[in-house]
Image (cartoon, rainbow, N blue to C red):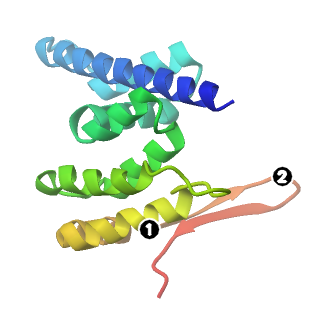
Amino acid sequence: MTDLHRSESVVAERKLAVIAELFVRRTAEVESDGAWTSTAHEVVEAEIGAALTMGRAAAGRLIGLGMSLRTRLHATREAMARGDLDMYRVRLIEDATANVSDDQIGEVEHQLLEQVLVPPRSGGTGLTGRRLTNAANRIIARLDPAGVRAKREKAQADRFVRVSAAEDGMCRILGSIPAA
């Protein structure tokens, strides 16, 4: 089971690398051909969505993750390529480090991976979920306080409340608002 999980991670890294490469190539095509009316991101979202049978939003998330691994999270990509990190933890790392400055990302990633890649203690799961995110936040707060402020400001700017229809005369409320 663990061998298959590692193999799955290796394949997922290759898929993300191909998606990032496709995005880079389509961006060059769109920029060199003034006749395009869509952005490269829209073109690649549609192309990936059709090829992988998914919606554009899901395809867009794969593009973002692939480009993060290609341009910012080099050690994370290498760990994933070895099968040491699965897609779940890679997404957590990308989310947690999204606002870290380019000057600090290498050190933040290095310190985080030192903790994430430690073999779990007997009966433990290692750093996953909230524990991984908390570890990342502690490292970022120490090394890149400006990144912490940027993350908070972005969250504040992106706040929202949505109400949508649901089945049986009910509605769904989804939101992200300040705790205060």
Position of residue 87 in the picture relative to residue 151 (left or right) = right
Tell me residue 97's x, y (percent).
Answer: 31, 55
The residue indicated by pointer 2 is 167
Query: Do the residues bearing badges 1 and 2 touch, measured as CB atoms within 8 Å?
Result: no
**Which quadrant does the N terminus fall into?**
top right
Q: Which mark is residue 155?
A: none
Q: Residue at x 63, y 32 (%)?
A: 2
The residue indicated by pointer 1 is 134
Q: Residue at x 68, y 57 (%)?
A: 123
| Residue 74, picture quadrant | top left
Which of the two labelled residues, at mark 1 and mark 2, occupies the earlier sequence position?
1
Residue 43 seen = no
- Residue type at the position of mark 2: Glu
Tell me residue 34's x, y (percent).
Answer: 14, 15
Q: Residue at x 40, y 65 (%)?
A: 135
Q: Residue 51 or 56: which is nearer the viewer?
A: 51
Q: Residue at x 49, y 20 (%)?
A: 11
Q: Mark 1, residues whose alpha carbon is within 10 Å: few (<14), some, or many (≥20)?
A: some
* Residue at disc 1, secondary structure: helix
CA separation in Å, label 1 and label 2: 36 Å
Position of residue 66 in the picture relative to residue 148 (left or right) = right
Q: Residue 122 or 91: which is nearer the viewer?
A: 122
- Residue type at the position of mark 1: Asn
Tell me residue 153's x, y (percent).
Answer: 29, 71
